[in-house]
Structures are given as C-alpha cells and as structure tokens.
C-alpha cells in the first residue's frame, strides 16, 4: 500500500525511490493533490521520486497538496544572455538548444532596433529542452509627430508638446505679426516625426516691430541773395 487512510485523512509513507506514476495515482484516489517538481539528477531513473514536501507519517486531508520532487532525464540548460544580439542570431542560438522561442517587440531607447532588449527567463536561470523562452526585440526609439504650435500661447504650446511626448527646448522672443505672447516660430516643422522625448524650441512674439519716422527738415530755404559768390563770379564769366 502507498498510504493508510483513516476517515478523511491519509497517513503518508516514505515515497522516495518509488515511481511517481504509481504514487500519484494512489494519492489522487484519496483526494490528495499531487504537484510534481521535475529536477535532473544524474544516477536516478526518470520518474523516480527524490523528495516529498510532507514527511512519512504526516497526515493530509482530502484536498491537501503534496509536492513531489521527481527525477527528470532532461539535463537543465543554464541560459546565457541574449541581450544585444540580432534577432536571427538569438533565435538560431536558442533553437540549437532545442528551446522554443516566442518573439515580442517593444520600443527601447537604449537598444538598437532589431536587437534583443529583454529575455525571459533571464541569464543564469535554468530551463530544459522544449521549454519556451521569450525574446523582446527592440523597435528602436518611438517616433512621434510634432504638433502645430504657431499662434498658441506659450502655456498652450507646452501642453501640446507634453501631450505628444515631447519637451520644451530653448525659448526665444522676436518681433512678428503674431500677437504679443503667441508662438511665432518652432524649431521643428509641424507634422515631422522626431524621437519621443525630443526637445522643440519655441519663438514667442513680442508684437510687431515699431516703425521709425524721421523728424521733418526745418532748415530755411535759401533766398536769391544768398547765392554763393563763387557762383555769381562764374556767371560773370559766362560759365
């Protein structure tokens, strides 16, 4: 017998060294849930129970769980880092280890587009043949469209940039036909794509440039009597 039942309780035996299939079937008939933890151990047959979470003599009620550590014939694989590898190279490396690969994609500001930016499980963790690893491939820096800012107040322009995922760059002022305090220039044209988080410079109007009107010339007109003598002498000579 694998265990002894008293009422709704089951008194556990020492299951180490036994076949997990036999023990699991017997315990399940008594309402005990069996959870298997597979581990590779050289020198043990596949399916052999190595450890149990509750010791011999312990009593479990119907619905309780017993965790059995079971020998696996698959040697665990210690994962290397795939971060920074080109997608095709990373997939080829994983498949050579007989691992399945799931691909996900995400924007990343630090990893070049088309290269692995994350992996799950992580470097150093152990998997076995047939397990699936997830590789996240960088889509590069996310691109966003620059909004149209001309004619907006500075506060409105800053809000529009923030909503688009952009920052305010340098702010200068200039005369323009736009009303005082309105944006009359932007460093990047509206509609172009830039990296998310980029800074867009603003030029704010201080109104139209004032015009300058020179003062009127009040110098008195020259009379006939004021003709320079040199000119009179020239006339006397018929010149």
Image: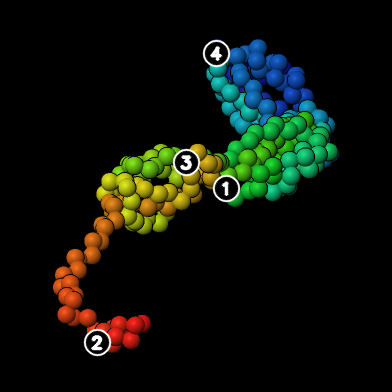
4 or 2: tag closer to the N-terminus? 4
Circles 4 and 3: CB distance less than 8 Å?
Answer: no
| Quadrant housing the N terminus | top right
2 or 1: tag closer to the N-terminus? 1
Image depth: mark 4 or mark 2 in front: 2
Which residue in the structure is indicated by mark 1? 109
> SS class of the residue under badge 1?
loop
Which residue in the structure is indicated by mark 4? 8
Where residue 226 sits in the image (x, y, percent)?
Answer: 18, 81
Tag of residue 229:
2
3 or 2: tag closer to the N-terminus? 3
Q: Decide: few, some or many residues near mark 3? Use Cα within 10 Å; few <14, some 14-19, many ≥20.
A: few
1 or 3: tag closer to the N-terminus? 1
Circles 1 and 3: CB distance less than 8 Å?
Answer: no
Where residue 188 sits in the image (x, y, percent)?
Answer: 48, 48
- Please, which colouring scheme is shown? rainbow
Q: Quadrant of residue 62?
A: top right
Q: Quadrant of residue 57?
A: top right
Circles 4 and 2: CB distance less than 8 Å?
Answer: no
Decide: is 163 above or below 174: above
Image depth: mark 1 or mark 3 in front: 3
Which residue in the structure is indicated by mark 3? 190
> SS class of the residue under badge 3?
loop
C-alpha separation, residue under disc 4 versus residue under disc 3: 75 Å
Circles 2 and 1: CB distance less than 8 Å?
Answer: no
199 or 126: which is nearer to us?
A: 199
Where residue 183 sits in the image (x, y, percent)?
Answer: 35, 47
Residue 192 in the figure: left or right of residue 184: right
C-alpha separation, residue under disc 4 versus residue under disc 2: 143 Å
152 or 232: which is nearer to us?
A: 232
Circles 1 and 4: CB distance less than 8 Å?
Answer: no
| Residue at image point 51% right, 44% down | 196
């Amino acid at each position: 017998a694998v265990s002894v039942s008293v009422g709704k309780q089951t008194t556990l035996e020492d299951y180490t060294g036994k076949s997990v299939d036999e023990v699991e079937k017997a315990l399940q008939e008594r309402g005990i849930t069996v959870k298997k933890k597979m581990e590779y151990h050289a020198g043990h047959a596949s399916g052999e129970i190595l450890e149990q979470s509750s010791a011999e003599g312990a009593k479990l009620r119907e619905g309780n769980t017993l965790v059995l550590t079971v020998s696996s014939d698959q040697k665990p694989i210690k994962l290397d880092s795939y971060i920074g590898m080109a997608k095709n190279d990373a997939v080829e490396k994983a498949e050579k280890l007989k691992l399945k690969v799931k691909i996900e994609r995400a924007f990343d500001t630090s990893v070049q587009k088309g290269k692995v930016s994350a992996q799950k499980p992580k470097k150093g963790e152990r998997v076995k043949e047939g397990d699936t690893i997830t590789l996240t491939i960088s889509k590069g820096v996310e691109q966003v469209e620059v909004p149209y800012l001309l004619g907006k107040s500075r506060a409105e322009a800053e809000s529009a940039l923030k909503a688009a995922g952009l920052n305010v760059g340098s702010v200068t002022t200039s005369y323009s036909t736009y009303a005082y305090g309105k944006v009359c220039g932007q460093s990047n044209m509206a509609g172009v794509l830039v990296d998310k988080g980029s800074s867009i410079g603003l030029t704010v109007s201080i109104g139209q440039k004032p015009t300058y009107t020179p003062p009127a010339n009040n110098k008195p007109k020259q009379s006939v009597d004021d003709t320079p003598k040199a000119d009179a002498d020239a006339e006397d000579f018929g010149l």
